[in-house]
DNA sequence: CGGTTAATTGACCCACTTCAAGCGCGGTGG
DNA sequence: CCACCGCGCTTGAAGTGGGTCAATTAACCG
């Protein structure tokens, strides 16, 4: 059975939404398979694969992405410690996107048969895992809104507000700073804009004295202003603790 | 207990992904609460609400939407017969978007306590309901890809390919025709473009002899061509029947 | 010190927006 | 039965956010 430390970010994340009992924590520890380290730039999963485990990110940053015929790429999600990168693979069975390690990552695998057992024996824990995928989904919807109806500047501001909050929840933020080790080209693929425009937009955020971004660390200098710019409302992250 | 007919589209949709046993079908029928008709333009659910039931769409068309400060609107999903419009409300507890009836709709409500009971007594059915929300999520991701990296023309083509297939799955398509009773302004809010541009883009799809759109019905005239234009690959709809 | 990758900048271009006006049609009230 | 209204669709013209191309600089690395 694995060390509970590896799951602490997950416990933080789920615990922020509802209490997890000791039996449930133990069930998760027992369901865990092997622990691996994956180096930056490697794919954790590829389009079309049929995974037999789901992968919890214990440390690092990953991205879900799809490629287009012209070689373009769209990143549809980032994941940090405490996130499952492909829990949906448990039931979807076939990956409809790739998952790439954007930094060195530590991951814990959960064999699908063990997850089936959880659904048979731990209804509340099952709902919490289901919830974890619903939170992903809520973030997708929010990205659709910002991508569809906001300028690059607002969109980028929104992404940074979101990540600050997510980083705080799992305890990897340091004050208003959090790690975000991606290139401007990666960010462009997430926002659906060109890397040239990312560069100019970032400069604007800097000149507005809202954000700094150095050596893979983002500092939010003026959170209230950034939130206003992004029309950020954290409802969609569902951070209330309540019976689920 | 309600008439099984009201759930037939749901059975079609789930049954396309895995077998549902008689006991599971019956459990769903027993979990159902009241049946209502909602007239076009009405909200089924609003931002910030805390629903006590989840709503299955048995007939009609609905849209999830978010509003922006400037009065703009982004539609993040359409739902047709057999789709739950807010199954995620079961665990998210608070709605992070509105749901609007785009046509007259027949809906079946499922009280959340009944869904809790399903998670306690029917693990496989629970996984199938979970799957239903994962399919929503997969569609969100696909929209992110098309919205981020495709032109309005390709995006619109993609949406129509998607809806043709979804309509076929639940049996509301007639050949290559399906109902889609929305205005061009609604479509603009879904694609994240202006209604003027929707109009011009639709004209182009028509002039390419790929699509017709009259009286709320879409006819796909040349599906292969439309798919090529949209780079449409149905993997993300996960239409294979297999153990889940 | 060459080689590579990321960040930056300038110049020009285009997909899509905005604004504004006109049109077709079903619904309604007199 | 018709005049009018409102909504959705259509079209034109002008403006802009962001794209593309291409070159330069900066940082790192063996």
Image (tube, coloured by chain):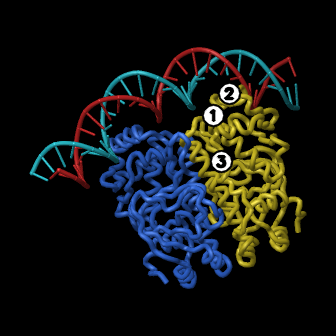
Chain colours: A yellow, B blue, C red, D cyan
Residue at 37 percent of width and 56 percent of height? B181
Chain of the residue displaying label 1: A
Q: Identify residue for label 2.
A: A204
Q: Which of marks 2 and 3 is nearer the N terminus?
A: 2
Q: Earlier in the sequence, mark 1 or mark 2?
A: 1
Report if the CB atoms under discs 1 and 2 are less than 8 Å apart. Answer: yes
Q: Identify residue for label 3.
A: A233
Determine whether the residue tagged by mark 2 lies in a helix, strand or loop: helix
Query: A57 above or below A153?
Result: below
Q: Where is residue A34 in the image (x, y as percent from the top left)?
A: 84, 63
Q: Identify residue for label 1.
A: A153
Residue at 63 percent of width and 48 percent of height? A76
Residue at 84 percent of width and 68 percent of height? A29
Tag 3: Cα neighbours inside 10 Å, few (<14), some, or many (≥20)?
few
Determine whether the residue tagged by mark 3 lies in a helix, strand or loop: loop
Tag 1: Cα neighbours inside 10 Å, few (<14), some, or many (≥20)?
some
Q: Position of residue D21 (x, y in %)?
A: 57, 23
Q: How far apart are marks 2 and 3 (CA)?
A: 22 Å
Chain of the residue displaying label 3: A
Q: Where is residue D6 in the image (x, y as percent from the top left)?
A: 32, 46
Q: How far apart are marks 1 and 3 (CA)?
A: 17 Å
Camera-nearest label, 2 or 3: 3
Report if the CB atoms under discs 2 and 3 are less than 8 Å apart. Answer: no
Q: Earlier in the sequence, mark 1 or mark 3?
A: 1
């Amino acid at each position: 059975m694995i060390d509970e430390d590896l799951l602490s970010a997950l416990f933080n994340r789920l615990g922020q939404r509802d209490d997890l009992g000791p039996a449930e924590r133990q069930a998760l520890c027992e369901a865990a398979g092997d622990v691996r380290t994956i180096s930056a730039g490697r794919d954790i999963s590829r389009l079309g694969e049929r995974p037999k485990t789901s992968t919890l990110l214990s440390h690092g940053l990953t991205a879900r992405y799809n490629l287009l015929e012209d070689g373009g790429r769209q990143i549809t999600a980032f994941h940090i410690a405490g996130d499952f990168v492909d829990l949906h693979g448990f039931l979807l069975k076939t990956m409809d996107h790739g998952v790439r390690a954007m930094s060195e990552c530590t991951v814990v695998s959960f064999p699908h048969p063990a997850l089936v057992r959880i659904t048979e024996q731990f209804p509340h824990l099952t709902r919490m895992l289901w919830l974890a995928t619903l939170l992903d989904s809520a973030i997708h919807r929010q990205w659709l809104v910002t991508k569809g109806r906001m300028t690059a500047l607002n969109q980028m501001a929104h992404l940074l507000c979101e990540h600050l909050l997510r980083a705080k929840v799992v305890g990897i933020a340091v004050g208003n700073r959090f790690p975000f080790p991606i290139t401007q080209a990666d960010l462009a693929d997430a926002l659906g804009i060109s890397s040239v425009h990312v560069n100019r937009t970032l400069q604007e955020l800097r000149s507005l004295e809202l954000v700094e971004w150095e050596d893979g660390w983002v500092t939010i200098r003026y959170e209230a202003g950034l939130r206003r710019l992004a029309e950020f409302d954290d409802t969609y992250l569902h951070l209330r603790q309540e019976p689920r």
